[in-house]
Amino acid sequence: MTAPQNTPAGRGAEGRDRLARALRDARADAAVSGVRAGQDAGMSQSKISKIERGLLLPSVDDVAALCRVYGIAGGRRTELVSLAEGLRQEASSRVIMARGVSEFQRRVTRIEADASLVRSFEPALVLGALQTREYTRRIFDDPRDKVSTEEAEASVEARQERHRALRDGTTGYRLIMHEGALRWHVGSPSTMVDQIEQIAAIATRVGSTTVGIIPWTTPVHVFPGHAFDIYDEDAVVVATETATATLTGAADIATYTELFTELEKLACFGAEAVVHLERIAGEYRALSGR
């Protein structure tokens, strides 16, 4: 296959696909299950799956470990390790930007389904996985987005699919918002009351989802300026005004993991979070006369 124009041989999407396919075929040839491969290589079965489907770019050490497990040596091992090294260098030198709204939402749903733990923070809006249908629809009504009616509705449905994953999926979620995100008055007081009540219901439900609220009265020592999601220890998705960036560099992931740990120290969880949610909802009820 010819490398894409302006893309070094073995790099880009073609290189990622080739590496994923090579590792998938090597495991099949070695007759090793995904679970066993993960155990022997020191990684999870979920990570093996994401690598083989091209959802996660493995590190050089990951590829070397898998070569050992699959019995790949000599020139073939050198080839795969070199390919991984080149792809990682390429990934660290640029940010992968996504602009297709509904397709991005569907991609996020797939990534979340494969993750063991998703950690998310949002300073200005309700986190996507917690949004009601009406709240999401109001967001996509923003005339600056220039999103078609069909694309907006597809995005609403894709985001609702993420909400269902909180209830029915096996992924663990740890979700944190600042109170300011709930003070951003979207649509109407009634829309906000319904939205906050849904968050409270999720926050009190026993399961794999934990919701944290940082009250405005809590002094802070960190200042994140944008929303972000951490998928296991594999990738960070960062929201910008015009697009969404996927970061896979180890240093980037470590930076956001450390930031999230500090945000957890500021947040209230469980019943304490619900107290603050009820306080905010009460103020919106007063505005709406409910």
Image: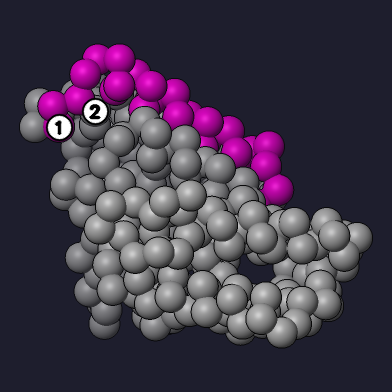
Q: Nearer the viewer, residue 153 or 69?
A: 69
Query: Residue most toward the right?
Result: 31
Asked if 112 appears above or below 77 in the picture, the reply is above
Q: Nearer the viewer, residue 107 or 124?
A: 107
Q: Decide whether the magenta segment is chiefly helix, strand or loop.
A: helix
The picture quadrant where one finds residue 240 is: bottom left
Query: Residue most toward the top?
Result: 150
- According to the picture, the residue beneath numbered tag 2 turns out to be 140
Residue 226: tell me if it is visible.
yes
Label 1: which secondary element: helix
Q: CA distance from mark 2 to mark 1?
A: 7 Å
Q: Are marks 2 and 1 in contact (CB under 8 Å)?
A: yes
83 left or right of 146 in image:
right
Q: Nearer the viewer, residue 152 or 33?
A: 33
Point out the tag, 2 or 1, that comes first from the N-terminus.
2
- According to the picture, the residue beneath numbered tag 1 turns out to be 145
115 left or right of 108 in image:
right
Q: Position of residue 282 (x, y in %)?
A: 32, 38
Report the quarter where the C terminus lies. top left
Tag 2: amino acid? Phe
Q: Position of residue 106 (x, y in %)?
A: 47, 35
- The magenta stretch is 145-172
Q: Position of residue 39 (x, y in %)?
A: 83, 74
Asked if 173 appears above or below 189 in the picture, the reply is below
Residue neighbourhood size for the residue with mark 2, other residues' Cα within 10 Å, grouped as few (<14), some (14–19), many (≥20): many
